[in-house]
Image: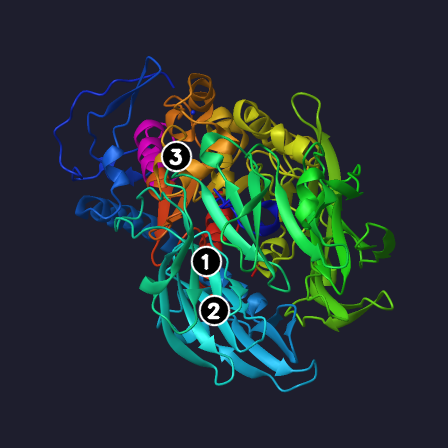
Amino acid sequence: MPFMLPRLFLANNHILAVNQPTVVMKKILSPLFLFPMISMAQMQYPVTSTVAQVDTYHGTLVSDPYRWLEDDHSAKTKEWIGEQNKLTYAYLEKIPFRKQMRERLEKVYDYPKYSSPFRNHSYYYFYKNDGLQNQSVLYRQQGLNGKPELVIDPNKLAADGTTRMTDFSLSKDGTHAAYAVSKGGSDWTEVYEMDMKTLATMPDHLEWVKVSGLSWQGDGFYYSRYPTPEKTLSSKNENHQVYFHTVGTSQDRDQLIFEDKQHPERFHHVSTSDDEKYSFLFVSDRGKGLDGNALYYKKKGDKAFTPIVSKITDYHYSVVDVDTAAHAFVISTNEHAPNYKVVTKSALPEWKSTGFTTIIPEQKEPIEHVSSAGGKLFVSYLKDVTSKVYLYNMKGVKENEVILPGLGTVGGFDGESDDKDVFYVFNSFTYAPTIFQYSIATQKTAVFRKPEVAFDVSLFDTKQVFYKSKDGTSVPMFIVFKKGIVQNGSNPTLLYGYGGFNINKTPEFDPLLIPFLEAGGIFVSANIRGGGEYGEAWHEQGMKLKKQNVFDDFIAAAEYLIREKYTDKDHLAIKGRSNGGLLIGAVLNQRPDLFKVAIPQVGVMDMLRFQKFTIGWNWIADYGTSDSAADFRSLYKFSPLHNINSKAVYPATLVTTSDHDDRVVPAHSFKYISTLQALAGKNTKAPLLIRVDTNSGHGASNTRKTIEITADIYSFIFYNMGITPKL
């Protein structure tokens, strides 16, 4: 789930960025665990103690017997985690091919991986992972053919490899850099500085940074942080502040640039123009249900920000560049353009008398990304969930289409105003990420770096199909498989979905998918509503009171796969993360008969209280809130925690979460699995388990943990389908 900064900053951030009759529980005076374990139909689960917590929502009484599990630091909760993990790992360790699965995953993942290079003066910077390194390493070299020089190796920041570098930003003159690190997968980051002449880390150390960029202007940079919070994982984050840090000074001397105590749930973020003459303030208020942002600017030397757009609505505004020749800001927006357009706004003093001037009108296909480099605009569109890229001049005149290798996903095209070349990465499900170099002058593309993967990609294929949802809407879906596979109605199939926050689930390469495909598995990605694959209209069809469309789309995808004999209900697994974890929890309650295995990962399971933890209020713009009577009725109908069917037989379920997830706090998963075991465990022979990772956050904190959890998920899926994969 995304942090939901302005659209320009959303790339690859998921829920940051991130429904039974009422039963009033009587108070039960019981210990945390009742031993011996109570006997279920097949599994024996710890009996989790309950409390007599009952809340009233608009006249409806709702019990919350596992409220105590929201205290993730208590001794009782830690004991509960230990007992649940003991049960889960004992089960996983009995799977005979689990070790071989992990070994195969390690082998296919073990090849060098590079990022696109980015230039600062004569240096080119890039990230590289030798293969199985826990964290990618940052290097630089003089020119494109220079000798690589180590800049930062995050693997040396923590013995267990769980400290990640989440941001690296160079000053305009290239003499200094600021970089942010996250420990144990947390969304909280700490910022340090480097002297780029000596590559020595300086004494500067900034704490409590979150939902922030590092934007340089002169001898310092802007960043966003919260006041020092209570030291609990789930504490609500309020009063997001913007500071300016001057190189070589302590954090207590940083200048407060902006805060708004009257609106504590707003996000504030500052970026700067390429020439550092302008700074831009983005303000969003998603906790009030507003999906867009306000936008302000300040010329260097000015004391206050001046509004470009002062009112926060559902419209997004992202500054792409400053056209210095025309003295205009170039802005991407969906104002009266659900598929987005590119406009300009004069930066001259008389700008107040003028509105936006459209230079690239809205098209049938939605704009996915707009960037600038070398005095040109690169606009990426989505055509049936695959990328198309066009080159425009700063006046909005189309000059060229960038010819891509095929149907897939592209990223990059960012650079400096004086760049002669830009780099981009193209990939798809069966096309390993390849870095291309694009000459702005000749408009020609050449392969810059192609990965040497440890397997034969040509053995696999992808096709896109369209199916009808419950209300007749046509929904696209990608199906990935090993060539020669037969539609015999019994192939092990993994159906994945997300469906929220305007996030596009485009074709992306994942080497860890290969062992699943090698074993005869089929991977399916359904582009259900709630995402942005067809623009803002597609997003809105899966928001708030229309959230049921998301679940209907996913269920219809499963029914299509069974109807077309790709698989059957005994060989169909479903998986989703974050907002996708909510998806899995909801469809399990609505159609437990349709699936054999379910993997809800770091899901938002308590739809009545999500806004009370960390930055959960940020998701109100997509979900609505239980504080509203109309929203409550909708949320209560599908909330995974509140709609578990005690009379139904559930599929084998492995819930995953992490002890350092301060985005979708683990209490969601803790309360959900406790309720699932208590209500559905007596009817369900299949295991209902939770796997709680340590020193990880909303995602695995390093390569080793990524491979470990993937091995456990695949092993759990095949084992519960009665299949021994050939590895």
Q: Residue at x 76, y 41 (%)?
A: 357
First to last magenta residue range: 670-687
Amino acid at pointer 2: Ala
Residue 660 or residue 335, whichever sits in front: 335
Query: Which residue occupies the extreme top position in the image?
Result: 59
Magenta highlight on residue 679: yes
Q: Dot 1 surroundings within 10 Å: few (below 14), some, or many (20 or more)?
A: many
Q: In the rendered image, which residue does mark 2 sit on?
A: 178
Say whether marks 3 and 2 touch (CB < 8 Å). Answer: no
CA separation in Å, label 2 and label 1: 10 Å
Say whether marks 3 and 1 touch (CB < 8 Å). Answer: no
Amino acid at pointer 3: Gln
Q: Considering only order in the chain, which callout, 2 or 3, is on the residue closer to the N terminus?
A: 2
Magenta highlight on residue 474: no
Q: Position of residue 169 (x, y in %)?
A: 53, 67
Say whether marks 2 and 1 touch (CB < 8 Å). Answer: yes
Which SS class for mark 1? strand
Q: Position of residue 129 (x, y in %)?
A: 55, 72
